[in-house]
Every structure is written in C-alpha cells, then in structure tokens.
Amino acid sequence: MKVKVYMSRKDEIYEKKSLEYVSKKFSKSVESILEKMESLAKSRDIKGIFQYFSKEIDRKAYYLLSQEWMKQEEALVEKIGFIFKLPGLKKDEERYTIYVLMAYSKGFVIAPSSVHHPGDLERIIILSYPSQKGKRAYYSFNTAAHGYPALFKDYLGVYDSLEKALENYSFYFKPGDHAVGLIRNKELKAYNELKRNIYSFLSKSKILTNLYQTAKEFFKKAGAEEETRELYMFYLIKPQEFKDNLDIDFEGYLERVVYLDSILTKLKRKSKDSKQKSLISKLEKILWRTPIEKVPDEIKSLYKKCESTKLFDSEMLQKMREIQLYVNEILKKVSDLRRDSFYDPEEYLQRKGIQKFSELSLSCKLEIPLGLEMLLRKPLYDWGYPEKSSPISKAGRAFFSVADVFYRAFQKITIIMSK
C-alpha cells in the first residue's frame, strides 16, 4: 500500500548527514570485528569465536546491511512502514497503528545528537467507529514530541476503509522531535493558494513586501528551505500481508491479550483477595508494559505462582499459556527471518512471501525483519494503547501533548512558508 509523505529539503539534508555517520559507523564496526576475530584466532579460542560471531555480528548487523542500502540513489527518500490492526477496548472500536521506519535509520536511533532524524520508528494511532451506511468514522493521534501520542485526536472523516482515508492525507515528519503526523492534502493545496493570494496582495506595497520577505527569512531559519518541496511516496505493509506473506499472526496474539485483559478487569472488580489482586496487577503489567520479547519469560514465571496459589481458574491459566505460545512463535519466525536476511540474503529474497513485496527495493525487503525485531522490543501499550501506559508515561503524554498544540501550529506555518 503506497501513501504520500511530505518532506522538506532540509530534512533530506539531515538524512544525508546521517548517512555519512552510518558509513563511518560501518567502517568502525567491520574494523572492530576483524580485530576481535584476529585476537580470538591467535589464542585458538574456537568457542570464543563462535560466541562472538553469534552475538557481536548480530548486534552490528544493521550497520553491515545499511552499507549496501546507502549505495542506492533512493536511500535519502526511501521509506517503509508497518500497519497493525489492533482490537479495540470498546464495543465496535477498531484500532490501527502505523509505524514508520524512516530512510537512513530504518527505525534505529544511530545518529549522534548533532544529527537530527525524522521519526525513528514512531507511529500514528488510528481509531475507527461504525458510521452511516456501513462506513466507519476515523480519528488519529499524531505523535507528539519525544514519541508520545498526542492527547487530542484529529477527525479524519468517514470512509469505507483505512486505505480510503489515507488517500486524502499525507504523512509529515519533522527532524529531531521523533514526530509523525497526518495533514490533509486539501490543506496543503489551500495553503499554497492562500500564500499566492497573500503574496499578490503584499506585492502592491513595497513596505508590506519587505515585511513579508523578513517573515519568510525567519521561517527559513526555523526549518524551511527555499528549494522546491515534493510529496514522496512510500510503502506500508498491510496487516494481512504479515500473515499471508510472512506467516506471522500478530492479530491472534493481540486478540488474546485484549480478551484476557477484559477478564482481568472484571475479576479485579470482584476480587477481595489482596494476593489475587497483586497477581492481576503483575499480569496486566506483563501484558501491556513489558517489552513483547520478554513477555514469554515473564508469563512463565508468573504462571508458576498462579498455578501454585490456585487463585486463578483453569481458563485463566490456559489464556496465559496461549499468549506465551503465540509470542514465542512470533519471536521465532521474526528471528528466523532476521537470521536468513543477514546470513543468506539471496535465499531470503527468493522466499515466495518476500517476493510478494514487489514494490519494495531489495534493501527495504532486507530491513523488514530488523524493523519487526525492534517493534518486539517495545511494550504493547506503545503500539496503540496509550491508556494502558504507566502513570509516568501518562504524565509525559499530557505535558508534551499540551505543548504540542502550539508546536504543531508553528509547524504548519513553516510548511506553508516552505511550499
């Protein structure tokens, strides 16, 4: 699925700087690997060689893969993202989260503080509800500064599907603030028309023209450039493609988490046993606020306690076990894809499922497992359930969302002036 994204020339300049940084990092990674391998070879430490190879090589795999990707001309503007369909927490509610892996980093924070990066694996959360004539009303939470979802949702409109909704919008990214947002295509056109009308009016007066040029210079320094902007296209992998092409059942896992959470909520209201309430709180924390890759081990540990205390019935224990098995299966499949994409890229690219992503470049196809691996290091609340976050995260969300209202207004002005 292709979508449009607005990116200013200045953002591309930041990305170019970051590409140079990745190139240097690649050289240092290769150099350190060779030095260590040489040291282990001299000491004839065969076990050490295998251990180092399996851990260190994997840890630096991104830099090794990105070197090939950076050689391509489209590296600066090439983008890829994932759409996940999430079960809602209310009746008839549907949720989607769109994670975007931006250009040079493909979702990895690799740039030093002096180099900005537009959206490192940040996301937009979309909610939808039934509307008239079988259609659905769509709302979105843009990402505020520092990766927090905005507190106030934007109304996108009533559409037949999410895909139809996104046809009317363009994504935008601002460097340095980890932010992703949607802006209506009509707004961009209206802004351009308004700008032309204002300029035409101001041009009739020399004083007003000078004031306008002064304001324009200010906005150029604030993040705009005089060069022509373009709406680029990038590709989103749809929810069903994960299951059909990669045989990864994210929806099955998510549905079981939401179902178990509904049981826990009811049980928590009725329970008068402090030990049982404590176990429920721990399980809720595992489901929502623990990095997904750590969920199986955490559930396994808690399962033993629940089983020995007999405070949960057999259905509850079974649901816990199902989630553990689902996550283990997802982790294994992503790990297998990750291993094959790095150690045997030719065979990986020949997979029928990978070949189905025909609109992606070879490098983008290789980045899919790395992006998924990064997503599995995030807790589930980050995917699309901000109300399940910790009190500290909720406070941070409130703070940055209020500040974001003024910041986004300023951003829109810079977009207008830069067009």
Image: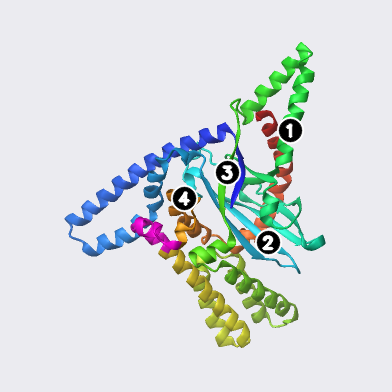
Identify which amino acid the numbered label 1 is placed on.
Tyr
Marks 4 and 3 sit apart, C-alpha to C-alpha, by 14 Å
Res 385 seen here:
yes
Marks 2 and 3 sit apart, C-alpha to C-alpha, by 24 Å
- What residue is shown with label 1? 191
Q: Which residue is drawn at 75% across and 77% down?
A: 269
**Which marked residue is nearer to the observer: mark 3 or mark 1?**
3
Mark 4 or mark 1, which has the lower sequence index?
A: 1
Q: How crowded is mark 4: few (under 14 residues within 10 Å), some or many (20 or more)?
A: many
Which stretch did the figure color magenta?
Answer: 337-352
Say if the magenta span includes residue 182. no
- What residue is shown with label 3? 233
Mark 4 or mark 3, which has the lower sequence index?
A: 3
Q: What element carries label 3?
A: strand
Pointers 2 and 1 in contact (CB under 8 A)? no
Picture quarter with the C terminus: top right
Pointers 4 and 1 in contact (CB under 8 A)? no
Mark 2 or mark 1, which has the lower sequence index?
A: 2
* Residue 386 screen position, x and y as percent: 67, 59
Q: Is mark 1 on a helix, strand or loop?
A: helix
Identify which amino acid the numbered label 2 is placed on.
Arg
Marks 3 and 1 sit apart, C-alpha to C-alpha, by 21 Å
- What residue is shown with label 4? 364
Marks 2 and 1 sit apart, C-alpha to C-alpha, by 30 Å
Mark 4 or mark 2, which has the lower sequence index?
A: 2
What's the mark number on residue 95?
2
Mark 3 or mark 1, which has the lower sequence index?
A: 1
Identify which amino acid the numbered label 4 is placed on.
Cys
Identify which amino acid the numbered label 3 is placed on.
Met
Marks 4 and 2 sit apart, C-alpha to C-alpha, by 26 Å
